[in-house]
Image: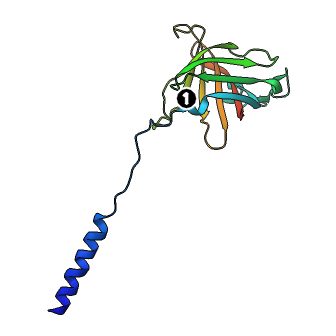
Amino acid sequence: MRSKSYYWLALFICFFAISCDNTEDGSYVDPITIYEKVNGNWGLTNLKMVDEFAKANKIEPSEENLSTFFNYEDFKINFSVDEKNKPTSYEVTGNVPPLFAPKGYWELSSDFQQTNASAVRIYLYSDAAKTQKTDELRVTSVPGNNDEMEFQLVHSSGGTPFVTYVFKLNAIN
């Protein structure tokens, strides 16, 4: 009889302890979007040009590092967002030959990283209404805790890519 009393007492204490656990989940916050990660100033660490025809036909060299040519070490780009983390404008600074429009407006193809392994795209526009697309950048490395980003600019003719520019950037604080 005494062991049943201890059993019921132990069971009561367990239920009491569990009922006292009131986990606070906090209040709702919006999820972190890629806009928040891309927002800001970025400085070029490396620019590589890939000859897609040479690469496909195994002709060497198929790649050329352009980082030290044409003042590309001065290349900087700023992606701006508004107070709601919606994209506004972008601007390239530095005395560099333009590979894409040096300023305009931008938006992403998706607010979040894709689960199907496809790259998020940065669409560049010449107008604030975002009706006149000028270029498209493929984000191949999304910024994270390391403050690094990589995107590619692909030039095509008749739907066939012939040259890809690979930009590696670091956040400038």
Q: Where residue 48 sits in the image (x, y, percent)?
A: 75, 29
Q: Where residue 170 sits in the image (x, y, percent)?
A: 72, 35
Depth check: 128 or 49 in front?
128
Left or right: residue 104 compared with residue 51: left
Quadrant where the N terminus sits is bottom left
Q: Is residue 57 visible?
A: no
Q: Which residue shows up at 59% across the image and 26% down it? A: 138
Q: Secondary structure at mark 1?
A: helix
Q: Which residue shows up at 53% across the image and 26% down it? A: 85
Q: Quadrant of residue 105?
A: top right
Q: Which residue is mark 1?
A: 35
* Amino acid carrying mark 1 in the image: Tyr
Number of residue marks: 1
Q: Where residue 147 sits in the image (x, y, percent)?
A: 67, 39
Left or right: residue 31 compared with residue 164: left
**Depicted 150 relative to depicted 72: above or below:** below
